C-alpha cells in the first residue's frame, strides 16, 4: 500500500427538503473542485428557522481528500 496524506475540510450544505439532501449538496459542490474525495462524515445537523418554521436544513460535513501538495 502506498503511503498517502489526506486533508480534512469542513463544509456546510443546505437544503429546503432534508438533511440528507443538504449533505449531498455539500459533497457534490466539493467534488467540482477537489479530487480524490475519500470519506465524508456528517458531524452536525441543524435547521434554519424563519417565523417559527423550518426554512432550511443544514448539514456540517467533514470531507477528506488525498493531499497532493503544491
Image: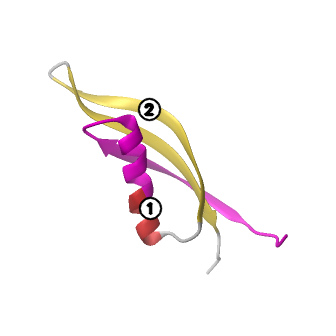
Q: Estimate the spatial distance between the alpha carbons at disc 2 and disc 1, rounded to whole Å.
A: 18 Å
Helix, strand or loop under label 2 = strand
Residue 42 percent location from the top left of the image: 52, 40
* Other-residue count near label 2 (Cα within 10 Å), few / some / many at <14 / 14–19 / ≥20: some
Helix, strand or loop under label 1 = helix
Residue identified by numbered label 1: 30
Residue at 56% from the left image edge and 53% from the top image edge:
63
Q: Which labelled disc corresponds to residue 64?
A: none
Q: Which residues are magenta?
A: 1-27
Is residue 4 inside the magenta stretch? yes
Residue identified by numbered label 2: 45
Image: 38 above or below 10: below
1 with respect to 25 (left or right): right
* Other-residue count near label 1 (Cα within 10 Å), few / some / many at <14 / 14–19 / ≥20: some
Residue at 46% from the left image edge and 41% from the top image edge:
60
34 with respect to 22 (left or right): right
Q: Quadrant of the N terminus?
A: bottom right
Residue 12 percent location from the top left of the image: 41, 46
Amino acid at each position: 500500500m502506498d503511503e498517502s496524506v489526506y486533508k480534512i475540510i469542513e463544509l456546510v450544505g443546505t437544503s429546503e427538503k432534508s438533511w440528507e439532501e443538504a449533505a449531498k449538496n455539500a459533497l457534490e459542490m466539493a467534488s467540482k473542485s477537489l479530487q480524490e474525495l475519500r470519506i465524508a462524515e456528517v458531524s452536525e445537523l441543524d435547521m434554519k428557522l424563519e417565523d417559527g418554521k423550518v426554512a432550511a436544513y443544514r448539514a456540517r460535513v467533514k470531507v477528506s481528500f488525498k493531499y497532493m501538495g503544491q
